[in-house]
Amino acid sequence: MKTIVETSTKLSKYLLADDVVITATANDITVGDPAQFIIADLNSGNATITENVTNAPEDWVGNKYKLDGTTWSANPDYVEPEEEE
C-alpha cells in the first residue's frame, strides 16, 4: 500500500494500492494514470508519499491515524462520524 500524509500534521489522508500511480507536483497531487482524481489541497511541498506500507490499521480511514514514516498512531482529535438512521 501507499499513503499520502500531510507533512505538518502527519495525518494519513489517503491509503492506496501499490500499483496506483501518484504524481506530486508543486500545485497538486494526481492519483492514477490516467488520472482518477486530483487532490488540490495537497502537493509536493506539504505532503509526503510513503510507499510499501504493510502495517496500516485494519480500521484505517482518512485522518483517523498519523504516520511518522514507519509508526502509526491514533489521531487524538479524530471523531467518528455519526451513523445515519
Image: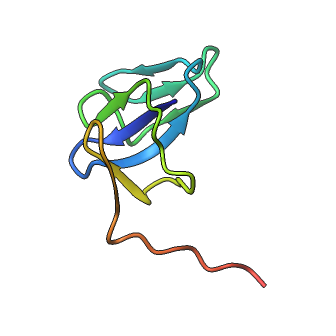
Residue 44 image-quadrant placement = top left
Query: Which of 15/73 is in front?
Result: 73
Q: Residue furthest bottom?
A: 85
Q: Which residue occupies 39% across, 42% down?
A: 41
Q: x and y percent of residue 53 in the render?
A: 44, 31
- In the rendered image, the quadrant that contains the C terminus is bottom right
Q: x and y percent of residue 58 in the render?
A: 56, 52
Q: Which residue occupies 39% across, 55% down?
A: 65
Q: Which residue occupies 53% across, 73% down?
A: 80
Q: Is residue 69 left or right of residue 63?
A: left
Counting every numbered tag in the picture gives 0
Q: Residue furthest right?
A: 85
Q: Residue furthest front?
A: 55
Q: x and y percent of residue 66 in the render?
A: 33, 52
Q: Residue furthest top?
A: 33
Q: Which residue occupies 73% across, 80% down?
A: 84
